Amino acid sequence: MHFTPIVEKLPSVVPFVGPETQERARGRKFRARIGANESVFGPSPRAAAAMQQAATEVWKYCDPENHDLKQALAVLHGVGPQNIVVGEGIDGLFGYTVRLFVEPGVTVATSLGAYPTFNFHVAGYGGRLVTVPYRDDREDPKALIGLAEREAARLIFSAARERIAAIATASGLKPLPSAANFVTIDCRRDGAFARRVLSELIARDVFVRMPGVSPLDRCIRVSAGLPSDLDVFEEALPQAFGAAAM
């Protein structure tokens, strides 16, 4: 039996050595398991109870539409069920994304040091991966976008938070750490000043939001957008900040 030409050319690499594998090699257990992006608190007791209740049904094929789960998630997040994708973890979702857009020869741009299994999916589907290095120990969004434009990349692997943070920092503002699809930016003064910044951005056709309660109202909130959106934001923010400070 022969592998496909793409698989034949893939190097033999291991992206992540699991803690169990290391424990077997070491001959003892880890005392603290804090290296795999796991929640050390475990599942919610309600989730565990629901799984126990459903355990007697695991002999059946699952609903291929994941109807009940999608409906519940849609209600929880205030979106339509058509906006929900269910997968077997982030690696599975990465695989679906690459499968939708990448075929042999298609270029994908990413940063050196980005999530490694995304790269394996690209290689596994015959994509051509191009990279830029980190700059000052961080993602370099401008270099990444420039690389994507030069190489006509079909996918860029980076959500957009790093670029928003860089734009804020360049204007003397403070981006707060984010794990969501937006970045909160501390305008470093009071709520009245932040509202002036907001108004000046709106005057320049940039829609952002801000918290309405002190002390959070000294901040504005910028959602992750397309590169073209962030180009506009990058141009408008220093103008808005300067106008608000007058």
Image: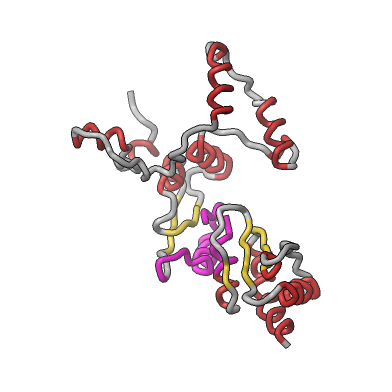
Residue at 80% x, 75% y is: 203
Q: Is residue 74 left or right of residue 111?
A: right
Q: How is the image coloured?
A: secondary structure
In the figure, residue 225 lies in which quadrant?
Answer: bottom right
The one of 1 and 134 positioned closer to us in this rendering: 134
Horizontal and vertical percent position of residue 64: 63, 23
Name the quarter where the N terminus is drawn.
Answer: top left
Depth check: 214 or 59 in front? 214
Residue 41: percent from left, percent from top: 46, 37
Q: Which quarter shows the C terminus?
A: bottom right
13 up-or-down from 44: above or below: below
Q: Position of residue 44 (x, y in %)?
A: 54, 32
Q: Position of residue 22 (x, y in %)?
A: 25, 37
Q: Residue furthest bottom?
A: 246
Q: Is residue 38 above or below residue 229?
A: above
Q: Residue at x 35, y 40 (%)?
A: 33
Q: Determine whether 180 is above or below 81 in the image.
A: below
Residue bounds of the magenta highlight: 136-165
Left/right of residue 160 with respect to residue 147 in the rendered view: right
Q: Is residue 100 rendered magenta in the image?
A: no
- Residue 143 shown in magenta: yes
Name the quadrant containing residue 38.
top left
